Image (cartoon, grey):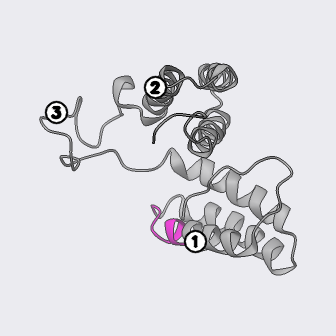
Amino acid sequence: MRRRARRSGAPIDPDELAGYLEGVRHRVAEASPDRRPSWQRQLRAAEAAFARGDRAEAEERLAALDDQMVGEEPELSEFPRGLVGYLPVGEIGGPRPEEEDPLPNRLSLLGRLAMVEQSRGRDVGAVLARLTEAHRALSAGDRGGARRIADEVLTELERTGPPAGAEP
């Protein structure tokens, strides 16, 4: 299970945290042998915090470990479902070209989704400001921060329903 952003100050659901812990545990088990020992130590610290009931510390440790592992996820090597004519750029297994970096592409798609919401009459000023923050974080090398903001923006866009008086 991948982490979903939650509002600041919102209580941490123990079942959701347990699922997140299990998902991270699985990803650590599947990690490359050179990364696994370090990540297992970090995972044990998160498990210990969870076992003693310190959900905030467990979530913080899991989020930090999750952020480290995201950069290690393999690139897309097969035709993704639904994308016709996808041609990967660069060599498979080589460094991922900038245009295939999922985080900037995700930020771009969130911006487009915000524009769709704006065309439907929704005020998206705060969302666009948060996306600007995410782009700044990414430019500064803070991929984890940019990813967290993107998660929050997506949660906000999903939370809002159609404007008053609009048809679904």
On the rendered structure, is 145 left or right of 165?
right
Which residue appears at 62% of the width and 45% of the height? Answer: 159
Q: Which mark is residue 25?
A: 1
Which image quadrant is residue 146 in? top right
Q: Disc 3 vs disc 1: Cβ atoms closer than 8 Å? A: no
Is 55 in front, or is 94?
55
Outermost residue on the bottom side: it is 51
From which residue to which does the magenta span run? Answer: 25-32
Report x, y in % for residue 22.
Answer: 59, 74
Q: How many marks?
A: 3
Is 129 in front, or is 3?
129
Is 141 placed above or below 154 here?
Answer: above
Name the amino acid, label 2: Val
Is 145 in front, or is 15?
15
Q: Disc 1 vs disc 2: Cβ atoms closer than 8 Å? A: no
Which residue appears at 24% of the width and 30% of the height? Answer: 90
On the rendered structure, is 66 left or right of 120?
right
Q: Is residue 142 magenta?
A: no
Report x, y in % for residue 17.
Answer: 70, 69
Is 151 in front, or is 47?
151
Report x, y in % for residue 129.
Answer: 68, 20
Give the distance between the C-alpha atoms of the residues marked 3 and 2, in whole angstroms. Answer: 28 Å
Name the amino acid, label 1: Arg
Q: Which mark is residue 87?
A: 3
State the SS at label 2: helix
Give the labeled residue for mark 2: 116
